[in-house]
Image (cartoon, rainbow, N blue to C red):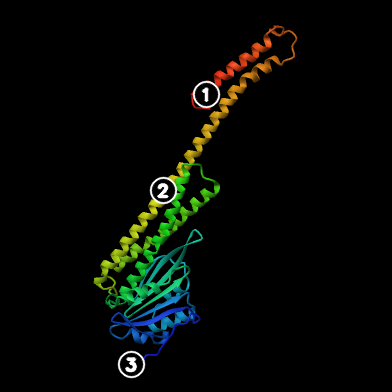
Amino acid sequence: MDHIRKFVPDSAEGGIVASSVYSGGKRIADIPIEDAGAWATREGHVVWIGLLEPSRELLLRVQAQFNLHDLAIEDAEHPHQRPKLEQYGEALFIVARTAQLIDRRVTFGETHLFVGKGYIVSVRHGPSTSYATVREHWESCPHSLAKGEDFVLYAILDFIVDNYMPVLEQLEYEVEEIEDKVLVKPMTATDIERLYMMRRDLLRLRNAALPLVEVCRRLTSADLPQIQPAMHPLFRDVSDHIRTVQEKIDSLREVLAFAFEASLLVGQSQETAISKKLASWAAILAVPTALAGIYGMNFSDMPELRMQYGYPIVLSAIAATCTFLYWRFRKNGWL
């Protein structure tokens, strides 16, 4: 049996999370980067390397092992790439966006994947759940992992898409709270700002997830010999998951739009009710104001000024008119 150098990945060593070689779906060794290329050329072996925000020097070491294209290395070094799939000779370069909810905001990271004969390299940038969970899960299923590097690619993409759902579930819970509150009282400026931020985050999440449908479509085409035909149904399943995410996002954005419109209607209704009340009281107060204004003029020759019961008659007329107006407005629902 060949001598295997024991290698323990060190987080201080430029971002290496894991560097392992598998045979028959079983991990047989953790290896240094400098041995990865040799192991990848062995029949039935797959090298799986995980990097976290690697330095350029580390990327160049990986490039030297698998003869990766310069443009792909440049993209992997600089995040903020759009989700895509590029083919460079016999290697594939895939960009996917990851999402996490941090401080009530959807925060995005990136995963860059290099896939070729006998190897797969994942490069993570920004917020992202560790793929150690993926490794541990599929290492317990050697039969599946033995299918090769294209199965590992499926496992990572499926994990990325599945992690969109917890973000959506948390946002859905908050959307339901907004729905319950919006019919009780109009939104405050803080509520409107939060609603706007949620709609924008959902749009950004949609833009991050939806391009993966095209990536998965290309992975199921006959133009990519790196992907075995037996793997096509798995990538179509990932596409179905993305469609589900898209539908969920569109549904939440529509609910938020309806909530905003409902809040406007509730606000307008309350403003109309207040306007009716103010108009009613203004009409009631206009009666004594008009009579007092007329008889407050300083003319000596005015009718009824010397009537013995003029004052109580005027007060009675004012009270009767105001009472009638109050009754009428209240009957009409204005007061």
Dividing the picture into quadrants, the one containing residue 41 is bottom left
Mark 3–mark 1 Cα distance, whole angstroms, equals 98 Å
- Above or below — where is 104 with respect to 18? above
Mark 2–mark 1 Cα distance, whole angstroms, equals 38 Å
Asked if disc 2 and disc 1 are in contact, CB closer than 8 Å, the reply is: no
Look at label 1 and name its amino acid.
Phe
Q: Secondary structure at mark 1?
A: helix
Give the crowd class for mark 3: few <14, some 14-19, many >=20 residues within 10 Å. few
Look at label 2 and name its amino acid.
Val
Report x, y in % for residue 66: 38, 82
Q: Tell me the mark number nearer the camera, choosing from 2 and 1.
A: 1
User: Which label's residue is closer to the chain start, 2 or 1?
Assistant: 2
Q: Which residue is mark 2?
A: 255
Report x, y in % for residue 254: 40, 49
Q: Which residue is mark 1?
A: 329
Q: Which residue is mark 3?
A: 2
Report x, y in % for residue 14: 49, 80
Q: Would you say residue 220 is visible in this rendering? A: no
Q: Secondary structure at mark 2?
A: helix
- Above or below — where is 169 with respect to 279? below
Q: Residue at coordinates 32% horizontally, 76% vertically from top-left?
A: 140
* Front residue of 110 and 69: 110
Look at label 3 and name its amino acid.
Asp
Report x, y in % for residue 114: 38, 75
